[in-house]
Image (cartoon, rainbow, N blue to C red):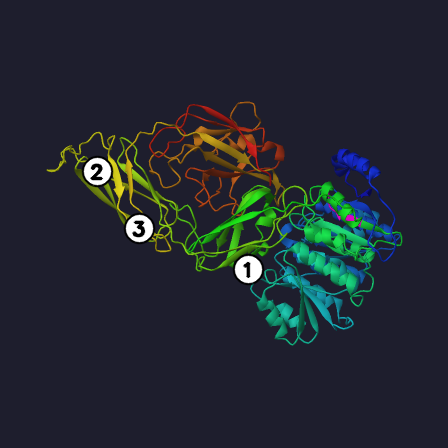
Amino acid sequence: MRLVLLGNGSTLRRRLLKTLMCVATLAAVLPFGHGAANAAASEAIVEWLAGPTRYETAAAIAQQYVAEFDGSVDTAILVSGEDGHAACALAAAALAGDQRAPMLLTRSDELPAAAEEFLDSAGISRTFIVGGTDEVSPAVANHVQAIVGSEPTRLGGSDCYATAVAVARHLGPLDPIPGRGRTVLLTTGEDYADGLAAGPFAYRSRIPVLLARPAGLDPGVEDLLRGRVDRVIILGGPAAVSEDVRLAVEALGITVERWFGPSRYDTAGRIATELLTDPSLTGCFEGSAVGLAAGSGSSDALASSPLLGERCAPLLLVRRDVLTTATASFLGSSLVVGDADGVVRLTVLGGSEAVSLGVAFDAERAASQLDGPSAVPVLADIEASEGACHWTVTFSEPVLTADAELTDNYTFGQEPLPARLAEIDGGDAATTRHAIVLLAGAGAYTSAEVPTGCAEPVAVRDRIGIVDGAIGASHGNGSVAAHEIVVQADTTSPSLSVLAPLGGDTVWVRSNEPLAAGTATVTLTRGRARKTQTAIVSQGDTGFSVTFSFPAADSYVAADLAFTEPPWLHPGDKITIDRGKLADRAGNLNTSVAAAVVADTTAPTISAVTVTEPVARIGGMYTVDLVLRWSEPVRGCGIGPAAGPIDLGSIQIDIDGDRFADVSLDGHGAASAGVAFVAAPDLSEWTVDGTAACDHAWTASDGTLIARLSSATAEMLPHSGSGVMARAGAAHDLVGNPSATHQVIGFGRTGT
């Protein structure tokens, strides 16, 4: 592999140097040859355009654009590089083609140094800002004006949807495409992957990119289309741009075609295939160059449309650590022919944090027709029950969480699972072996271990599946194989278990599945004496408790041992619940249950503390998410007794690993340690300001604690070298045993 490293990222060079040396050694012994035009490529040149952040990467792409224009560029386009505004950059691609201008990314309220340096060094005299003042502030516009000497032309609206319309109107009347007429592209405004892949086409043909809302066609878009457009090309499947949107466009008398595949990676391949097989679209895409960018989790390629458009290079999407099957297949196809010598130019957009060197190497091999080891498919097991508001997926090996959490990677009724019907939780780590699909409307009670309350629960004969090759393995180029189940009728009775601690007065009952609303009679038997207590069970509960009273003089004629106080629950006491008193959601009645009172003298301990990698947030702050779990349920968070809550002040974090406490989970000492506990609605509604808190989500066990910590400096936050120190009695289990004596446990890091 011949590799060219471009850009202004010295950090990237240092990070990749050691790996590049290994790859150079491999490349020296690989049997590269030379191909001929109109045949599959036989050699690849891999070019990297990257910087330490997306802003430096955009500047590096712009510098390369200017270099290939031989210095004849005098115009630049600026768009917000912040994640919430990424859709505005999609609309800028056609404007960049109209102006023959590179694109730069800027922060909303500050012009990055890399963008400032480019504007100054490239001799830019005219600028456009794509986006309203929320996306790119007046302060940034004034800064740009001071550099280039002229006021930027702003094309923007109230949001990116309106901005896309403003750009399209600025472009004026549309030039018809042979066989299609006046054409525009329509993609979702909620995710930029599909529109990003079409960027080189939008640039080259100057076709506007408009955005669709999840609920329907935006009024501004509808007004623009009426009478001015003959055809709309929808980018992405129904999960991205709904059928309601398609029908709304067709109702305007406009022809609609849809370019899509089962995943964003397949959609990008479909777009590339259209460009390379239909010369009427632009007439220049011939398979001699291809761009590669991350399909999720990175905005590094947002500014790539001008450069790739000038090179007539389609943009394919990859996972950071996996070359997807769809992308590998396209690179190895006869469409990627290379130049006259059979050499194809692969341009990787973004550093190794966006696209790993291993993926670039796999892409080179695929484009060079070099056979590598075949990927072993990852297997998946789907478990779904009649009446449930969720189903679970277990993978045979770790997969990428970002893929596992995409609804369009699953099928429901042999169609892509609509995002409006479900959300998917794959955990907080970058990889996972489990995913939980939660149906819309479902919630969870504190006492419920599974979600309930959805409008349309899983029904008998529902077909649930996974799209072939859509979910990538965490290592190598493997992916999850297609799998589908048909939901069978639930004929299994719910199983109940009982915890009745010696010396207490409360009994806890657990069910292995959610129960229907009802009442249950719990009976305490001591010899021939009996006491009963009625419990009310709410819909979806998987646990409940009852408390018995023991008056000192209470006795029964038929009793051979009176109930006395104290002690309360005696050794040998029996707790029973009769058969058929409770039902699961499918109507199956419970089996009878009987348990004896036993002693529990085991103290609860902290079993694990995990912390994520630091994440840079808007405003320059870094955050990590912390999760603390216990060896058994403890009081204060879940269905256990309200008395004796967790003492957060007795659980302390040793951030720097010197065995001295820096901050307590109740927030004490946070200010002096340079950190703060902040709310995190994107993580959990239970993550609050000022302190750690109990995680009441249904996926958490009783007593799980969560917190998001923030700091201006990433190094000041808890990390894999940190630890937690808990004093004796910081928590009590459901029986009342206090937590163990002073405990110290190191952190485990989960990744982002």
Image position, residue 332 (x, y; %): 76, 52
704 inside magenta stretch: no
Visible residue check, residue 140: no
Q: Which residue is most to the left?
A: 557
| Residue 304 located left or right of residue 464 | right
In this picture, which residue range is highlighted in magenta?
346-351
Q: Is 416 in front, or is 648?
A: 416
Q: Residue at point 26% right, 39% down?
A: 575
Image vertical order of residue 737 relative to residue 620, above or below: above
- Residue 135: image tag: none
- Residue 525: image tag: 2
Kind of residue indicated by mark 1: Pro
Q: Which residue is mark 1?
A: 418
Q: Residue at point 63% right, 58% down?
A: 262
- Please tell me whether mark 3 sits on a helix, a strand or a loop: loop
Kind of residue indicated by mark 3: Leu
Image position, residue 76 (x, y; %): 78, 55
Q: Which residue is mark 3?
A: 582
Q: Residues within 10 Å of mark 1 (few under 14, many from 20)?
A: some
Q: Earlier in the sequence, mark 3 or mark 1?
A: 1
Kind of residue indicated by mark 2: Thr
